[in-house]
Amino acid sequence: MMQIPPVQIVPRLSARDIGMKDMDNIPALMAEIGQRARAASQQLASASAARKHAALIAAAEAVWAARSEILQANAKDLEFGRDKGLSAAMMDRLMLDELRIQGIVDGLRAVAEQADPVGEVLAEWDMPSGLHIRRVRTPLGVIGVIYESRPNVTADAGALCLKSGNAVILRGGSESYHSSAAIHACLVQGLRAAGLPEDAVQLVPTRDRAAVSALLTMTDTVDVIVPRGGKGLVGLVQREARVPVFAHLEGIVHIYLDKDADPQKAIDVVLNAKTRRTGICGAAECLLVHQDIAESLGRDVVAALLAAGVEVRAEGTLAVDGTVPAAAEDWGREYLDAIIAAKPVADIDAAIGHIRKFGSSHTDCIITETPAAAERFFQQLDSAILMHNASTQFADGGEFGMGAEIGIATGKMHARGPVGAAQLTSFKYLVQGDGAVRG
Protein backbone atom coordinates (compact mmCIF):
# COMPACT_ATOMS: atom_id res chain seq x y z
CA MET A 1 0.00 0.00 0.00
CA MET A 2 1.20 3.51 -0.85
CA GLN A 3 2.67 5.39 2.10
CA ILE A 4 0.65 8.52 2.78
CA PRO A 5 2.24 11.27 4.88
CA PRO A 6 0.08 13.28 7.28
CA VAL A 7 -2.42 15.56 5.56
CA GLN A 8 -1.99 19.31 5.95
CA ILE A 9 -5.55 20.61 5.90
CA VAL A 10 -5.34 24.01 4.25
CA PRO A 11 -6.69 25.28 0.93
CA ARG A 12 -4.15 25.09 -1.91
CA LEU A 13 -4.02 28.89 -2.11
CA SER A 14 -3.78 30.31 1.39
CA ALA A 15 -3.30 33.90 2.44
CA ARG A 16 0.44 33.13 2.66
CA ASP A 17 0.49 31.85 -0.93
CA ILE A 18 -1.13 34.89 -2.49
CA GLY A 19 -0.59 37.60 0.08
CA MET A 20 -3.18 39.29 2.27
CA LYS A 21 -3.37 42.10 -0.25
CA ASP A 22 -4.74 39.75 -2.91
CA MET A 23 -7.18 38.16 -0.45
CA ASP A 24 -8.84 41.58 -0.39
CA ASN A 25 -8.68 41.83 -4.17
CA ILE A 26 -11.04 39.11 -5.34
CA PRO A 27 -10.64 39.73 -9.11
CA ALA A 28 -6.84 39.45 -8.76
CA LEU A 29 -7.18 36.33 -6.61
CA MET A 30 -9.49 34.63 -9.11
CA ALA A 31 -7.36 35.67 -12.08
CA GLU A 32 -4.34 34.06 -10.42
CA ILE A 33 -6.30 30.88 -9.74
CA GLY A 34 -7.51 30.82 -13.34
CA GLN A 35 -4.03 31.24 -14.77
CA ARG A 36 -2.70 28.44 -12.58
CA ALA A 37 -5.59 26.21 -13.63
CA ARG A 38 -5.01 26.91 -17.32
CA ALA A 39 -1.32 26.03 -17.03
CA ALA A 40 -2.15 22.86 -15.09
CA SER A 41 -4.79 21.82 -17.62
CA GLN A 42 -2.23 21.89 -20.40
CA GLN A 43 -0.05 19.43 -18.50
CA LEU A 44 -2.97 17.28 -17.35
CA ALA A 45 -4.40 16.90 -20.86
CA SER A 46 -1.51 14.63 -21.82
CA ALA A 47 -1.05 12.90 -18.45
CA SER A 48 -1.06 9.13 -18.64
CA ALA A 49 -3.99 7.08 -17.44
CA ALA A 50 -1.66 5.35 -14.96
CA ARG A 51 -0.59 8.62 -13.38
CA LYS A 52 -4.17 9.86 -12.98
CA HIS A 53 -5.12 6.49 -11.49
CA ALA A 54 -2.26 6.76 -9.01
CA ALA A 55 -3.31 10.27 -7.99
CA LEU A 56 -6.88 9.17 -7.27
CA ILE A 57 -5.82 6.10 -5.28
CA ALA A 58 -3.40 8.22 -3.24
CA ALA A 59 -6.15 10.77 -2.62
CA ALA A 60 -8.52 8.04 -1.46
CA GLU A 61 -5.93 6.73 1.00
CA ALA A 62 -5.24 10.28 2.20
CA VAL A 63 -8.96 10.88 2.86
CA TRP A 64 -9.22 7.76 4.97
CA ALA A 65 -6.02 8.53 6.84
CA ALA A 66 -7.29 12.05 7.58
CA ARG A 67 -10.84 11.07 8.55
CA SER A 68 -10.48 12.38 12.11
CA GLU A 69 -9.30 15.75 10.86
CA ILE A 70 -12.08 15.84 8.27
CA LEU A 71 -14.69 15.16 10.95
CA GLN A 72 -13.22 17.91 13.12
CA ALA A 73 -13.46 20.31 10.21
CA ASN A 74 -17.02 19.17 9.54
CA ALA A 75 -17.96 19.86 13.17
CA LYS A 76 -17.01 23.51 12.59
CA ASP A 77 -19.23 23.60 9.52
CA LEU A 78 -22.15 22.01 11.37
CA GLU A 79 -21.85 24.66 14.07
CA PHE A 80 -21.82 27.35 11.38
CA GLY A 81 -24.89 25.76 9.76
CA ARG A 82 -26.81 25.67 13.04
CA ASP A 83 -25.97 29.32 13.69
CA LYS A 84 -27.13 30.13 10.17
CA GLY A 85 -30.44 28.34 10.78
CA LEU A 86 -30.11 25.67 8.10
CA SER A 87 -33.04 23.24 7.81
CA ALA A 88 -32.72 19.67 9.03
CA ALA A 89 -32.49 18.47 5.42
CA MET A 90 -29.69 20.93 4.63
CA MET A 91 -27.85 19.94 7.80
CA ASP A 92 -28.10 16.33 6.66
CA ARG A 93 -26.53 17.29 3.33
CA LEU A 94 -23.72 19.01 5.19
CA MET A 95 -23.04 16.33 7.79
CA LEU A 96 -20.19 13.85 7.46
CA ASP A 97 -19.63 10.74 9.54
CA GLU A 98 -17.23 7.84 9.12
CA LEU A 99 -19.67 5.97 6.86
CA ARG A 100 -19.98 8.95 4.54
CA ILE A 101 -16.23 9.42 4.49
CA GLN A 102 -15.96 5.77 3.50
CA GLY A 103 -18.38 6.62 0.70
CA ILE A 104 -16.03 9.41 -0.44
CA VAL A 105 -13.12 6.97 -0.41
CA ASP A 106 -15.13 4.40 -2.37
CA GLY A 107 -16.15 7.06 -4.88
CA LEU A 108 -12.55 8.10 -5.47
CA ARG A 109 -11.52 4.49 -5.96
CA ALA A 110 -14.44 3.81 -8.30
CA VAL A 111 -13.50 6.78 -10.50
CA ALA A 112 -9.87 5.65 -10.45
CA GLU A 113 -10.80 2.20 -11.76
CA GLN A 114 -12.93 3.46 -14.63
CA ALA A 115 -11.59 3.42 -18.16
CA ASP A 116 -9.79 6.65 -18.99
CA PRO A 117 -12.01 8.57 -21.43
CA VAL A 118 -9.26 10.80 -22.85
CA GLY A 119 -8.15 9.63 -26.26
CA GLU A 120 -11.06 7.20 -26.69
CA VAL A 121 -11.90 6.81 -30.37
CA LEU A 122 -15.58 7.59 -30.77
CA ALA A 123 -15.71 6.92 -34.48
CA GLU A 124 -13.33 6.46 -37.41
CA TRP A 125 -13.75 6.18 -41.13
CA ASP A 126 -11.99 6.44 -44.48
CA MET A 127 -12.87 8.88 -47.25
CA PRO A 128 -12.44 8.37 -51.03
CA SER A 129 -9.97 11.27 -50.94
CA GLY A 130 -7.54 9.04 -49.04
CA LEU A 131 -8.15 10.64 -45.65
CA HIS A 132 -8.47 8.52 -42.53
CA ILE A 133 -10.52 10.41 -39.91
CA ARG A 134 -10.89 9.69 -36.22
CA ARG A 135 -13.09 11.48 -33.70
CA VAL A 136 -11.50 11.16 -30.24
CA ARG A 137 -12.34 12.38 -26.76
CA THR A 138 -10.38 15.34 -25.45
CA PRO A 139 -10.59 17.27 -22.16
CA LEU A 140 -12.68 20.43 -21.96
CA GLY A 141 -9.82 22.29 -20.28
CA VAL A 142 -10.68 24.18 -17.08
CA ILE A 143 -13.97 23.54 -15.30
CA GLY A 144 -15.42 25.77 -12.60
CA VAL A 145 -17.68 23.95 -10.15
CA ILE A 146 -19.90 26.00 -7.84
CA TYR A 147 -21.78 24.00 -5.23
CA GLU A 148 -23.65 24.25 -1.95
CA SER A 149 -23.52 22.40 1.35
CA ARG A 150 -22.46 18.88 0.39
CA PRO A 151 -18.72 18.58 1.08
CA ASN A 152 -18.47 15.25 -0.75
CA VAL A 153 -18.89 17.20 -4.01
CA THR A 154 -15.33 18.44 -3.44
CA ALA A 155 -14.05 14.90 -3.88
CA ASP A 156 -16.50 13.89 -6.61
CA ALA A 157 -15.86 16.95 -8.76
CA GLY A 158 -12.12 16.89 -8.23
CA ALA A 159 -11.90 13.20 -9.08
CA LEU A 160 -14.05 13.38 -12.20
CA CYS A 161 -12.25 16.41 -13.58
CA LEU A 162 -8.87 14.80 -12.94
CA LYS A 163 -9.97 11.54 -14.57
CA SER A 164 -11.15 13.41 -17.66
CA GLY A 165 -7.92 15.41 -17.91
CA ASN A 166 -9.44 18.72 -16.84
CA ALA A 167 -8.19 21.20 -14.28
CA VAL A 168 -10.92 22.31 -11.88
CA ILE A 169 -11.64 25.37 -9.75
CA LEU A 170 -13.89 24.41 -6.84
CA ARG A 171 -16.03 26.98 -5.10
CA GLY A 172 -17.91 25.24 -2.31
CA GLY A 173 -20.68 26.70 -0.21
CA SER A 174 -19.87 28.81 2.81
CA GLU A 175 -21.51 26.15 4.97
CA SER A 176 -19.00 23.46 3.95
CA TYR A 177 -15.93 25.70 3.93
CA HIS A 178 -13.82 23.75 6.45
CA SER A 179 -14.91 20.28 5.31
CA SER A 180 -14.19 21.11 1.70
CA ALA A 181 -10.73 22.43 2.60
CA ALA A 182 -9.94 19.23 4.48
CA ILE A 183 -11.01 17.01 1.59
CA HIS A 184 -9.29 19.25 -0.96
CA ALA A 185 -6.00 18.89 0.91
CA CYS A 186 -6.23 15.14 0.35
CA LEU A 187 -6.80 15.59 -3.38
CA VAL A 188 -3.75 17.83 -3.60
CA GLN A 189 -1.75 15.21 -1.75
CA GLY A 190 -2.82 12.64 -4.32
CA LEU A 191 -1.69 14.90 -7.17
CA ARG A 192 1.65 15.47 -5.44
CA ALA A 193 2.18 11.75 -4.89
CA ALA A 194 1.57 11.02 -8.57
CA GLY A 195 3.77 13.84 -9.84
CA LEU A 196 0.87 15.80 -11.35
CA PRO A 197 0.46 19.59 -11.08
CA GLU A 198 -1.10 20.50 -7.74
CA ASP A 199 -2.91 23.41 -9.39
CA ALA A 200 -5.02 20.88 -11.32
CA VAL A 201 -7.50 20.90 -8.41
CA GLN A 202 -7.87 24.27 -6.70
CA LEU A 203 -10.31 25.37 -4.01
CA VAL A 204 -11.27 29.04 -3.83
CA PRO A 205 -9.92 30.06 -0.39
CA THR A 206 -12.62 32.56 0.56
CA ARG A 207 -16.31 32.65 1.44
CA ASP A 208 -16.65 36.01 -0.31
CA ARG A 209 -19.45 35.76 -2.89
CA ALA A 210 -17.57 38.12 -5.16
CA ALA A 211 -15.42 35.08 -6.02
CA VAL A 212 -18.46 33.44 -7.64
CA SER A 213 -19.19 36.48 -9.78
CA ALA A 214 -15.56 36.61 -10.86
CA LEU A 215 -15.46 32.90 -11.73
CA LEU A 216 -18.54 33.24 -13.93
CA THR A 217 -16.84 35.80 -16.17
CA MET A 218 -13.36 34.24 -16.51
CA THR A 219 -13.72 33.51 -20.22
CA ASP A 220 -9.96 33.61 -20.80
CA THR A 221 -9.18 30.76 -18.41
CA VAL A 222 -12.40 28.81 -17.69
CA ASP A 223 -14.11 26.66 -20.34
CA VAL A 224 -17.31 25.60 -18.61
CA ILE A 225 -19.18 26.20 -15.34
CA VAL A 226 -21.07 23.47 -13.51
CA PRO A 227 -23.43 24.76 -10.80
CA ARG A 228 -24.66 22.24 -8.27
CA GLY A 229 -27.21 23.52 -5.82
CA GLY A 230 -30.66 25.00 -5.41
CA LYS A 231 -32.74 27.11 -7.76
CA GLY A 232 -31.26 30.34 -6.40
CA LEU A 233 -27.67 29.32 -7.12
CA VAL A 234 -28.42 27.93 -10.58
CA GLY A 235 -30.48 31.00 -11.48
CA LEU A 236 -27.62 33.28 -10.41
CA VAL A 237 -25.16 31.32 -12.52
CA GLN A 238 -27.39 31.33 -15.58
CA ARG A 239 -28.01 35.08 -15.30
CA GLU A 240 -24.43 36.16 -14.71
CA ALA A 241 -22.27 33.59 -16.48
CA ARG A 242 -20.23 34.57 -19.51
CA VAL A 243 -18.71 31.11 -19.54
CA PRO A 244 -20.81 28.19 -20.97
CA VAL A 245 -22.90 26.43 -18.27
CA PHE A 246 -23.96 22.83 -17.73
CA ALA A 247 -27.28 23.58 -16.06
CA HIS A 248 -28.25 21.55 -13.00
CA LEU A 249 -31.75 22.73 -12.15
CA GLU A 250 -33.67 21.76 -9.06
CA GLY A 251 -35.06 18.24 -8.79
CA ILE A 252 -38.83 18.63 -8.98
CA VAL A 253 -39.22 14.87 -9.10
CA HIS A 254 -42.59 13.24 -9.82
CA ILE A 255 -43.83 9.70 -9.29
CA TYR A 256 -46.98 8.62 -11.14
CA LEU A 257 -48.92 5.60 -9.88
CA ASP A 258 -50.66 4.12 -12.90
CA LYS A 259 -53.95 2.24 -12.56
CA ASP A 260 -52.01 -1.01 -13.05
CA ALA A 261 -49.39 -0.29 -10.39
CA ASP A 262 -48.33 -3.20 -8.16
CA PRO A 263 -49.36 -2.20 -4.60
CA GLN A 264 -46.23 -3.40 -2.81
CA LYS A 265 -43.89 -1.94 -5.41
CA ALA A 266 -45.77 1.36 -5.21
CA ILE A 267 -45.47 1.63 -1.43
CA ASP A 268 -41.84 0.50 -1.36
CA VAL A 269 -40.71 2.78 -4.19
CA VAL A 270 -42.57 5.90 -3.05
CA LEU A 271 -41.40 5.57 0.55
CA ASN A 272 -37.79 5.09 -0.49
CA ALA A 273 -37.95 7.87 -3.07
CA LYS A 274 -39.23 10.35 -0.49
CA THR A 275 -37.72 9.30 2.82
CA ARG A 276 -34.31 7.68 2.22
CA ARG A 277 -32.72 11.12 2.03
CA THR A 278 -35.10 14.04 1.70
CA GLY A 279 -32.44 16.65 0.96
CA ILE A 280 -31.03 15.29 -2.31
CA CYS A 281 -32.13 16.27 -5.81
CA GLY A 282 -33.44 12.78 -6.56
CA ALA A 283 -35.95 12.83 -3.70
CA ALA A 284 -39.59 12.61 -4.82
CA GLU A 285 -41.48 15.87 -4.41
CA CYS A 286 -44.85 15.14 -6.06
CA LEU A 287 -47.05 12.05 -6.14
CA LEU A 288 -49.60 11.67 -8.96
CA VAL A 289 -52.17 8.87 -8.70
CA HIS A 290 -54.54 7.54 -11.37
CA GLN A 291 -58.06 8.38 -10.25
CA ASP A 292 -59.18 4.74 -10.53
CA ILE A 293 -56.87 3.75 -7.65
CA ALA A 294 -56.76 7.01 -5.71
CA GLU A 295 -59.21 5.87 -3.03
CA SER A 296 -57.54 2.47 -2.64
CA LEU A 297 -53.81 2.19 -3.35
CA GLY A 298 -53.39 5.98 -3.47
CA ARG A 299 -54.70 6.38 0.06
CA ASP A 300 -52.59 3.43 1.24
CA VAL A 301 -49.46 5.11 -0.08
CA VAL A 302 -50.46 8.41 1.54
CA ALA A 303 -51.03 6.60 4.84
CA ALA A 304 -47.58 5.00 4.60
CA LEU A 305 -46.00 8.41 3.98
CA LEU A 306 -47.82 9.93 6.95
CA ALA A 307 -46.74 7.01 9.15
CA ALA A 308 -43.14 7.67 8.08
CA GLY A 309 -43.39 11.27 9.27
CA VAL A 310 -43.86 12.91 5.88
CA GLU A 311 -46.14 15.92 5.57
CA VAL A 312 -48.49 15.23 2.65
CA ARG A 313 -50.03 18.25 0.94
CA ALA A 314 -52.94 16.64 -0.87
CA GLU A 315 -56.00 17.47 -2.90
CA GLY A 316 -59.06 15.58 -4.11
CA THR A 317 -59.62 12.03 -2.92
CA LEU A 318 -56.07 11.86 -1.53
CA ALA A 319 -56.89 14.55 1.04
CA VAL A 320 -57.55 12.29 4.03
CA ASP A 321 -57.15 12.76 7.78
CA GLY A 322 -53.60 13.79 8.58
CA THR A 323 -52.88 15.49 5.26
CA VAL A 324 -52.57 19.22 4.66
CA PRO A 325 -54.61 20.90 1.91
CA ALA A 326 -52.44 21.49 -1.16
CA ALA A 327 -52.04 25.07 -2.36
CA ALA A 328 -51.29 26.29 -5.87
CA GLU A 329 -47.65 26.88 -4.98
CA ASP A 330 -47.17 23.24 -3.96
CA TRP A 331 -47.04 22.11 -7.60
CA GLY A 332 -43.63 22.55 -9.15
CA ARG A 333 -41.86 22.93 -5.82
CA GLU A 334 -38.65 21.33 -4.61
CA TYR A 335 -39.06 20.82 -0.86
CA LEU A 336 -35.79 19.04 -0.03
CA ASP A 337 -37.57 18.11 3.19
CA ALA A 338 -40.03 15.54 4.56
CA ILE A 339 -42.87 17.07 2.54
CA ILE A 340 -44.59 15.82 -0.61
CA ALA A 341 -47.46 17.12 -2.74
CA ALA A 342 -50.07 14.59 -3.90
CA LYS A 343 -53.05 14.67 -6.26
CA PRO A 344 -55.20 12.31 -8.31
CA VAL A 345 -55.09 12.61 -12.11
CA ALA A 346 -57.51 11.38 -14.74
CA ASP A 347 -55.05 9.13 -16.57
CA ILE A 348 -51.48 8.79 -17.78
CA ASP A 349 -51.87 11.66 -20.25
CA ALA A 350 -52.99 13.96 -17.45
CA ALA A 351 -49.95 12.88 -15.42
CA ILE A 352 -47.66 13.60 -18.37
CA GLY A 353 -49.28 17.00 -18.83
CA HIS A 354 -48.81 17.86 -15.16
CA ILE A 355 -45.13 16.86 -15.27
CA ARG A 356 -44.56 18.88 -18.45
CA LYS A 357 -46.07 21.92 -16.77
CA PHE A 358 -44.49 21.66 -13.32
CA GLY A 359 -41.42 19.43 -13.72
CA SER A 360 -37.79 20.51 -14.00
CA SER A 361 -36.62 17.89 -16.56
CA HIS A 362 -34.59 16.17 -13.84
CA THR A 363 -36.07 12.77 -12.91
CA ASP A 364 -39.60 11.35 -13.17
CA CYS A 365 -40.96 7.87 -12.53
CA ILE A 366 -43.93 5.68 -13.41
CA ILE A 367 -45.12 2.71 -11.34
CA THR A 368 -47.01 0.28 -13.55
CA GLU A 369 -47.16 -3.36 -14.58
CA THR A 370 -48.23 -2.43 -18.10
CA PRO A 371 -45.24 -2.15 -20.48
CA ALA A 372 -47.21 0.00 -22.93
CA ALA A 373 -47.88 2.57 -20.21
CA ALA A 374 -44.22 2.69 -19.24
CA GLU A 375 -43.21 3.08 -22.89
CA ARG A 376 -45.69 5.94 -23.37
CA PHE A 377 -44.33 7.66 -20.27
CA PHE A 378 -40.77 7.28 -21.62
CA GLN A 379 -41.69 8.54 -25.10
CA GLN A 380 -43.82 11.51 -24.10
CA LEU A 381 -41.55 13.00 -21.43
CA ASP A 382 -38.11 14.47 -22.03
CA SER A 383 -36.67 14.53 -18.53
CA ALA A 384 -32.96 13.78 -18.26
CA ILE A 385 -33.81 10.60 -16.32
CA LEU A 386 -37.01 8.57 -16.61
CA MET A 387 -37.65 5.54 -14.42
CA HIS A 388 -40.05 2.62 -14.34
CA ASN A 389 -40.73 0.79 -11.07
CA ALA A 390 -37.56 2.13 -9.43
CA SER A 391 -36.88 4.66 -6.70
CA THR A 392 -35.88 8.10 -7.94
CA GLN A 393 -33.10 8.06 -5.33
CA PHE A 394 -31.18 6.03 -7.94
CA ALA A 395 -30.76 9.29 -9.91
CA ASP A 396 -27.09 9.37 -9.08
CA GLY A 397 -23.91 8.93 -11.08
CA GLY A 398 -22.56 6.32 -8.68
CA GLU A 399 -25.71 4.23 -9.12
CA PHE A 400 -25.33 4.57 -12.90
CA GLY A 401 -21.87 3.02 -12.76
CA MET A 402 -20.03 6.32 -13.17
CA GLY A 403 -18.28 6.07 -9.81
CA ALA A 404 -19.42 9.57 -8.94
CA GLU A 405 -21.03 12.55 -10.61
CA ILE A 406 -20.43 16.26 -10.80
CA GLY A 407 -24.19 16.89 -11.01
CA ILE A 408 -27.35 16.02 -12.91
CA ALA A 409 -27.46 18.17 -16.05
CA THR A 410 -31.01 19.05 -17.09
CA GLY A 411 -30.22 21.14 -20.18
CA LYS A 412 -29.91 19.95 -23.77
CA MET A 413 -26.15 20.26 -24.13
CA HIS A 414 -24.03 17.17 -24.82
CA ALA A 415 -23.83 16.45 -21.08
CA ARG A 416 -27.26 15.41 -19.78
CA GLY A 417 -28.30 13.44 -16.74
CA PRO A 418 -25.51 12.32 -14.40
CA VAL A 419 -22.32 14.08 -15.47
CA GLY A 420 -19.41 11.68 -15.08
CA ALA A 421 -15.88 11.71 -16.47
CA ALA A 422 -16.90 10.93 -20.05
CA GLN A 423 -19.40 13.80 -20.07
CA LEU A 424 -16.61 16.20 -19.06
CA THR A 425 -14.90 15.73 -22.41
CA SER A 426 -15.37 17.18 -25.86
CA PHE A 427 -13.85 15.70 -28.99
CA LYS A 428 -11.49 16.56 -31.79
CA TYR A 429 -10.90 15.15 -35.25
CA LEU A 430 -7.59 13.52 -36.13
CA VAL A 431 -7.16 13.46 -39.89
CA GLN A 432 -4.39 11.48 -41.59
CA GLY A 433 -3.43 11.37 -45.24
CA ASP A 434 -0.53 10.28 -47.42
CA GLY A 435 0.19 13.43 -49.38
CA ALA A 436 -3.53 13.98 -50.02
CA VAL A 437 -4.45 17.21 -51.83
CA ARG A 438 -7.91 18.55 -52.60
CA GLY A 439 -8.91 19.00 -56.23
Image (cartoon, grey):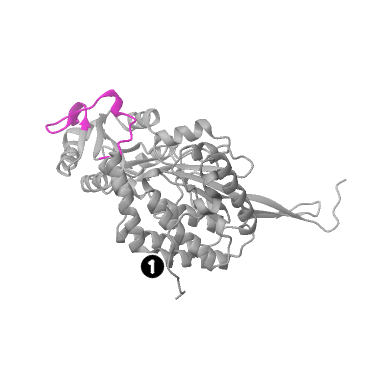
Q: Residue furthest right?
A: 439
The relative height of residue 31 versus residue 421 in the rendered view (above or below) is: above
Q: Quick one: 164 or 395, which is closer to the camera?
A: 164
Report if residue 353 lies within the magenta region: no
Please identify the quarter of the rendering in which residue 234 is found: top left
Query: Residue at 46% of width from left, 59% of height from top?
Result: 185
Q: Quick one: 252 or 368, which is closer to the camera?
A: 252
- Bounds of the magenta span? 313-337
Where does label 1 land, which residue? Answer: 65
Q: What percent of the width, then of the height, locates residue 68?
A: 33, 63
Q: What percent of the width, then of the height, locates residue 92?
A: 29, 48
Q: In the image, is 1 to the left or to the right of 301?
A: right
Q: Main secondary structure of the magenta part?
A: loop
Query: Residue at 24% of width from left, 37% of height from top?
Result: 339
Q: Residue furthest top?
A: 328
Q: Quick one: 408 or 264, which is closer to the camera?
A: 408
